[in-house]
Amino acid sequence: MLQANVEALVNTVNTVGVMGKGIALQFKERFPENYKLYKKAAEEKKLETGKVLIIPTNRMDDVKWIINFPTKKHWRNPSKLEYITSGLDDLVKVINEYQIKSIAVPPLGCGNGGLDWKEIKPIIERKLSKLNDVDIQVYEPSDIAYEQKEKKIISKPKLTPTRAIIIYLMKVYSQFEYSLTLLETQKLVYFLSRLGDENAQKIKFEKFQYGPYAYQLAHILYDIDGVYISGMKYKDVKTFDPLYIIEENFREIDEFITSNSTDTQKNRLENLLSLIEGFETPLSMEVLATVDYVLYNEVENKENLDEIVKKVHDWNNHKKQVLTTEYIKVAHERLKKFSKVLNYY
C-alpha cells in the first residue's frame, strides 16, 4: 500500500500515540514527521475515534497527505465497528475539504484490530461511494489471499540445536510490547550467526533496507511453520508481517535445548539475549544490527563514531532519515561491550 501512486494514504492508528505493529509501524519509519505530530496530538488528548487526523507530508515527489484513522482507543484493545463507521464519515468530509483526488485505504480494523473483513469491506465501499471523481484503492488484509490454503504437514520437522534456539529466541522476543515480525526474526538469526553458530553462519546476510537480511531464512522458517511457528504464508511473508509461536509445542523446544545443546550453544544463547536486552523494538533491532554490520565489515577504527555514523547514513536514505546519531551511539556502546564475542578485533 505504501507504494500506491496516490495523493493520500490512510494510516490506521490508536489514540494513545503508539505505532508499534503492522502497517502503522511502516508509516512511522517512512513518515517520521507524521508520527511526531500524531504522537503530540495523542499526548494532548486531541485524538478520538470517529475523527481522522490529516497531516501534510511536504514532499514534492511523494504522497501529499497522511490521514491517521483511529481504529482503536488503546493499542492493546480490539477495534470496534462503530469506530470504523463514524471514522469513515469523517474521512469523506476530509477528502472533500482537502479536494483529495486519489487515496489508498487499508483494511480498517482488521488484522490486529480483530474485525471481520467480510463485514468491513462493504461498509467501506458504501461509505466511500458518496465521493465523486476520487480514485479509491482499498487494500484487503494480507491473510485474505491465503485463507483457502493450508500447509500439509507430511512429517514433523527435524529439530536441531540451531533451529530450537531460533524458535526460543522468537518466543522470548514475542513476549515484549511489539509483535514479532520477520524483520526482528531476521535480526535474531543474524546475531546468532555473528556470535558463532556454525549453522546460522551458512546463511548469507546482505545489506537490505532495514539492515542485514537473508532471503534464504524464509525457507528455514517455512520448514518449521505449522508445527512450531505460524505466519509464513507459503514463504510469501512480508518484512513487517507478524509471526507467531505455536504455544502448545513450545515445551518441546525448551526440553530439546536443555537436553541436546552444548554448553557453548547455551552460553551463546545467553549472550544473544543479553546483547539485545533493552533493544526489543523493530527500530532498535534495526539500529543494533546495522551498526554491527558496519563495524564488522566496513570500519577499521571501531572507536570512530563519526565514521560509523557516515557508513550507516550512506547505507540508504531511510537510515539517513531515521537512524539518528544518538541512536547509533547507543547501539555502538552496547556492541562494544560484546566486542570479544563479536570478533571486532
Image (cartoon, rainbow, N blue to C red):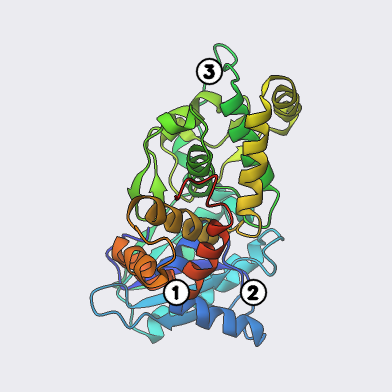
Of tags 2 and 1, the one toward the viewer is 1
Residue closest to the eye, 145 or 291: 291
SS of the residue at dot 2?
loop
Identify the residue position indicated by label 1 in the image.
325
Q: Quadrant of residue 60?
A: bottom left
SS of the residue at dot 3?
loop
Instruction: Report, in whole angstroms, how far the alpha carbon at label 2 lies from the one at label 1.
Output: 29 Å
Identify the residue position indicated by label 3 in the image.
152
Q: Amino acid at mark 2?
A: Thr
| Picture quarter with the N terminus | bottom left
Say the numbered circle drawn on residue 238. none
Q: Quadrant of residue 134?
A: bottom left
Q: Amino acid at mark 1?
A: Thr
Labels 2 & 1 near each other (Cβ < 8 A): no
Residue 115 visible, this orientation: no
Instruction: Report, in whole angstroms, how far the alpha carbon at label 3 lies from the one at label 1.
Output: 48 Å
Q: Residues within 10 Å of mark 2 (few under 14, many from 20)?
A: many
Residue closest to the eye, 237 or 205: 205
Q: Earlier in the sequence, mark 3 or mark 1?
A: 3
Identify the residue position indicated by label 2 in the image.
15
Q: Position of residue 256 (x, y in %)?
A: 71, 22
Q: Residues within 10 Å of mark 1 (few under 14, many from 20)?
A: some
Q: Position of residue 312 (x, y in %)?
A: 36, 64
Q: Residues within 10 Å of mark 3 (few under 14, many from 20)?
A: few
